[in-house]
Structures are given as structure tokens and as C-alpha cells.
Image (spheres, rainbow, N blue to C red):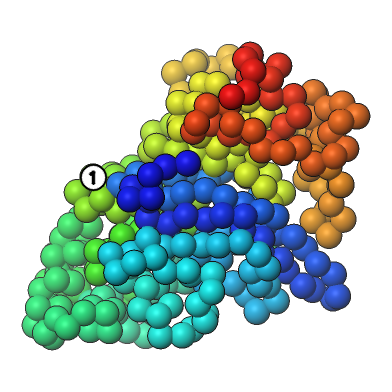
């Protein structure tokens, strides 16, 4: 993968399972990727493929019925490597890292904002907990953050409760809170799905600025291939708990190899290609996660499947950065594996 000094978080062979009614759902079945410093990794895939569980595993915010079974999540911090997977969910070290060094923003800002405290109070609390900033300096910082997020009249707005903010403003307030301690990593789980396109563009601009100016490593979960084309440096395509293809944005969008990536790209209109595009829905539906097929999870929906696909394919590198889990990668990539 990449030189470790460029990597903020490395995830290797991560398996996270859910246990419900004595049944096991292998929600993540051996996932590996890097979140690089100053770069955006977009994670894409249909509903239920494991995007949110990946984020929750990193943040140690998994529901009680689930646990990390195997694998490593290493945070390469300024004070050395920290094995996040091995930390106690609510232990001192995890609380030190979560929210300050690794921050998360969600689709619903009220997941992060508390309705009974003013926005300013919540930003200041985070600063008080994670830094030794004085009360006055924290107040100033809260105002600066709101200003940077484009919130008008920040000196007044800082004292408002979240319900006085519009949807787009709440989203920006949540980002302000996430940014308060200058995190090294920002994990964003569909942060703009509920917002109109203008606000969406503003929020993406803010995230891009963070990456450029603070070297923040960003992991962005999205359904939107347009967003991927615009923001991603790297892309990981997930299907049923595996990363079936990953690479730089150019590799994955220009030379998609896995039939699932191809189907995903063919299922969305491409900006600039006009109105008469041949858009094809991906046929079939995702398998029952409690009753998964044995081999390649996509085989039943795949136009290229052969008998070999009844066994799970290994991961193959097509270039040093482009990897794919498909038996037919050689034919589909147009050249042999390295
Ligand atoms: N709280 C939960 N309890 C039980 N199973 C869960 C829970 N959360 C997720 N799962 C299961 O874990 C698997 C991965 O789900 P996950 O939420 O990560 O998908 P996703 O790719 O984020 O989907 P979406 O795009 O809809 O958010 C699915 O099989 C899902 O049913």
C-alpha cells in the first residue's frame, strides 16, 4: 500500500460480526485500506455493504451486539502507533482520540449535537475536555469555527440552541464541532445526503479545505459517484462486507475491473454525458446477510460469473495501488496481474 508516514489510519484484515438471535452476520469480512494524510478516501457501495460498520469499528462506536473479531486498526498518531481495535470502547485512550484526533460527522447532525445545549457550549465543552484552552479562548475559537463554516452573525449564533439553526447550518455546526480540535482524521458518513446541492457543495468545499490546509485524512462514505469523481483521491468499493476493488480515483473510475464496480458506475448518470445515457440498474438484489453465498458474493448478479466463482476469489494487485477481488480480473482489466 503506501509509506506508513503518509498514512493516518491503516486497517488490515478487519472482521466485524453482528450476533443476533444466535445467528452471525459477518458484516465486515476481512477489510483492508489506508486513510492517508491530506487525502480523501471515498467508500462506496450499496446499502448494507458495511460502510457504516467500517466507520463505527474505527471509532469504537459499534452497537453492543457486534464486535471486532479479527484484524487491526492502527492510528499512526504523533505520539506513536495506537491499536484502536484493541482499545476499550470507552476507556481513557479511546476517549482521548475520539472527537479530538479522529472526528466523525454524520448524515443526521442531531446524532452529534445535543438539543439541550447551545451550539457554542458544545464546541467549548469539546475544547475544554481535549485541550487546556481557557474559557475565553474556547469562546473565541467557537466563534472563529462558526465563521469559517460560513455561519452568519457567529457572535450571536454561538449562543443559539441547535433547533434555532436550519438543516444546513446544523450540519455546518456539527462540522465546526468536529473540527474544533483540528483532528488528524475526519470520518464522514453520508454527511450531505439530506441537504440541497448548494449547501452540499459548501460542505464539500469545507472538507476539501481541511484536507489542503490542515493535512486532515478524510474517509468519506457516499452513495454518490459524482461526489467520488469530484472529491476522492482514493476509492474503495464495498460489497457484502468485502472491498471488491480499490485504487486511486482515476484507476477505479477510468479502468473499473470488478463487474460490481462496472455495474455501479453504469447505474448512475455521468455528468457531461447528456440526457440520453444508457443507465442500467444492477440486476438482482444483495444476498441475505445471514445466509451468504459461499464464494464471490456478487456471482449471482454478475454477467461474467463462471463455476470458479463459487469459491471466494483472492485479492489481486493490477497495479501497486489498484486491487480487485475477482477471478476474471485478467480478462476484465485487459492485462495480466503484476
Ligand atoms: N445495529 C445493527 N444490528 C444488526 N445488524 C446491523 C446493525 N447495523 C448494521 N448491521 C448489519 O451490518 C451489515 C452492514 O451494514 P452497514 O450499516 O454498515 O451498511 P451500509 O453500507 O452503511 O449501508 P447504508 O448505505 O444503508 O448505510 C448489514 O448486513 C447490516 O444489516
Q: Residue at x 87, y 47 (%)?
A: 294
Residue 177 visible here: no
> Viewed as shown, does residue 53 lie left or right of 162?
right
Give how far across and how far down residue 317 sits, in percent.
Answer: 59, 31
Q: Where is residue 282, by image quadrant? A: top right
Q: Residue at x 47, y 69 (%)?
A: 83
Q: Secondary structure at mark 1?
A: helix
Q: Quadrant of the C terminus?
A: top right
Q: Residue at x 15, y 60 (%)?
A: 147
> Viewed as shown, does residue 142 lie left or right of 226?
left
> Viewed as shown, does residue 46 lie left or right of 42?
right
Q: How many marks?
A: 1
Give how far across and how far down residue 142 sits, in percent.
Answer: 18, 72
Q: Residue at x 66, y 60 (%)?
A: 15
Residue 126 visible here: yes
For this rendering, which residue is in front, 287 or 280?
A: 287
Q: Where is residue 183, by image quadrant? A: bottom left
Residue at numbered disc 1: 212
> Viewed as shown, does residue 38 lie left or right of 153?
right
- Does the closest atom of ligand 1 sit within 8 Å of the Cβ of label 1? no
Compared to 44, does 142 lie above or below?
Answer: below
Disc 1: CA contacts within 10 A as few (<14), some (14-19) or many (>=20): some
Give how far across and how far down residue 63 sits, in percent.
Answer: 62, 75
For this rendering, which residue is in front, 29 or 200?
A: 29
Amino acid at each position: 500500500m503506501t509509506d506508513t508516514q503518509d498514512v493516518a489510519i491503516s486497517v488490515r484484515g478487519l472482521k466485524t460480526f453482528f450476533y443476533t438471535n444466535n445467528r452471525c452476520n459477518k458484516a465486515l469480512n476481512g477489510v483492508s485500506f489506508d486513510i492517508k494524510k491530506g487525502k480523501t478516501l471515498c467508500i462506496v457501495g450499496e446499502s448494507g455493504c458495511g460502510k457504516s460498520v467500517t466507520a463505527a469499528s474505527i471509532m469504537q462506536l459499534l452497537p453492543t451486539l457486534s464486535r471486532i473479531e479479527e484484524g487491526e486498526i492502527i492510528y499512526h498518531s504523533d505520539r506513536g502507533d495506537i491499536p484502536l481495535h484493541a482499545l476499550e470502547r470507552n476507556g481513557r485512550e479511546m476517549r482521548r482520540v475520539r472527537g479530538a484526533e479522529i472526528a466523525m460527522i454524520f448524515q443526521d447532525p442531531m446524532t452529534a449535537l445535543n438539543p439541550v445545549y447551545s451550539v457554542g457550549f458544545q464546541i467549548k465543552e469539546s475544547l475544554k475536555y481535549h485541550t487546556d484552552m481557557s474559557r475565553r479562548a474556547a469562546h473565541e475559537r467557537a466563534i472563529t469555527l462558526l465563521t469559517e463554516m460560513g455561519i452568519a452573525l457567529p457572535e450571536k449564533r454561538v449562543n443559539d440552541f441547535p433547533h434555532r439553526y436550519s438543516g444546513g447550518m446544523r450540519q455546518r455546526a456539527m462540522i465546526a464541532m468536529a473540527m474544533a480540535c483540528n483532528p488528524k482524521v475526519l470520518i464522514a458518513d453520508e454527511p450531505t445526503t439530506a441537504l440541497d446541492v448548494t449547501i452540499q457543495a459548501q460542505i464539500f468545499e469545507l472538507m476539501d479545505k481541511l484536507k489542503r490546509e490542515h493535512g486532515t485524512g478524510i474517509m468519506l462514505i457516499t452513495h454518490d459517484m459524482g461526489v467520488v469523481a469530484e472529491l476522492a483521491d482514493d476509492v474503495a468499493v464495498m460489497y457484502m462486507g468485502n472491498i471488491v476493488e480499490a485504487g486511486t480515483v482515476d484507476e477505479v473510475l477510468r479502468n473499473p475491473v470488478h463487474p460490481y464496480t462496472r455495474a455501479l458506475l453504469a447505474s448512475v448518470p455521468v455528468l457531461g454525458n447528456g440526457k440520453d445515457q444508457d443507465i442500467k440498474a444492477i440486476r438482482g438484489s444483495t444476498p441475505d446477510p445471514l445466509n451468504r453465498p459461499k464464494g464471490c458474493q456478487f456471482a449471482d448478479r454478475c454477467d461474467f460469473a463462471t463455476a470458479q466463482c463459487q469459491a471466494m476469489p483472492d485479492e489481486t494487485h493490477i497495479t501497486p495501488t489498484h486491487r480487485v477481488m475477482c477471478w476474471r480480473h485478467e480478462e476484465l482489466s485487459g492485462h495480466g496481474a503484476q
